[in-house]
Amino acid sequence: MPKYLVQASYTSEGAKGLLAEGGSGRRAAVEQVVRSRGGTVEAIYFAYGDADLYCVIDFPDPLSMAAVAMTVRASGALQSRTVPLLTVEEIDEAARQDVDFRAPGA
């Protein structure tokens, strides 16, 4: 399954919800929304700094990730960034691909 790193920052309204529910409540909400599209949560970490929350999530396809991301962002409770993650083997396969490219000025 495709794997993603989600980095999220709570808005002030989202932070109020986090304070009310605690980390366990938000973890349950993340797990529920991910399961609703056939995905699984590998890890959830709260942090402080540039982002408030980091999740590593598996989805059966990119459209499931997009559907969840759009729905969650539309709530206005957070802003997020999703990074597709590739395995070492996937990078090996990509490195073997022929690509027709000319560098600028070459």
Image: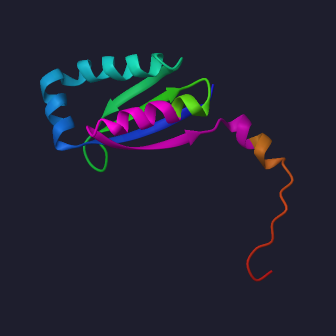
The quadrant of the picture occupied by the N terminus is: top right
Q: Where residue 16 sits: x, y (%)? A: 13, 33
Q: Where residue 36 sits: x, y (%)? A: 46, 17
Is 55 placed above or below 94 here? Answer: above
Is 83 placed above or below 17 here? Answer: below
In this picture, residue 10 sits left or right of residue 43: left
Q: Is residue 20 magenta?
A: no
Q: Residue at x 52, y 32 (%)?
A: 65
Is 57 placed above or below 10 here? Answer: above
In this picture, residue 100 sits left or right of residue 41: right
Q: Residue at x 73, y 78 (%)?
A: 104
In this picture, residue 90 sits left or right of residue 41: right
Q: Where residue 61 sits: x, y (%)? A: 62, 28
Q: Residue at x 36, y 23 (%)?
A: 30
The quadrant of the picture occupied by the C terminus is: bottom right
Q: Where residue 58 sits: x, y (%)? A: 54, 25
Q: Is residue 87 magenta?
A: yes
Query: Which residue extends farthest bottom?
Result: 105
Highlighted magenta segment, given as a residue range: 66-91
Q: Nearer the viewer, residue 48 or 104?
A: 104
Q: Nearer the viewer, residue 98 or 78?
A: 78
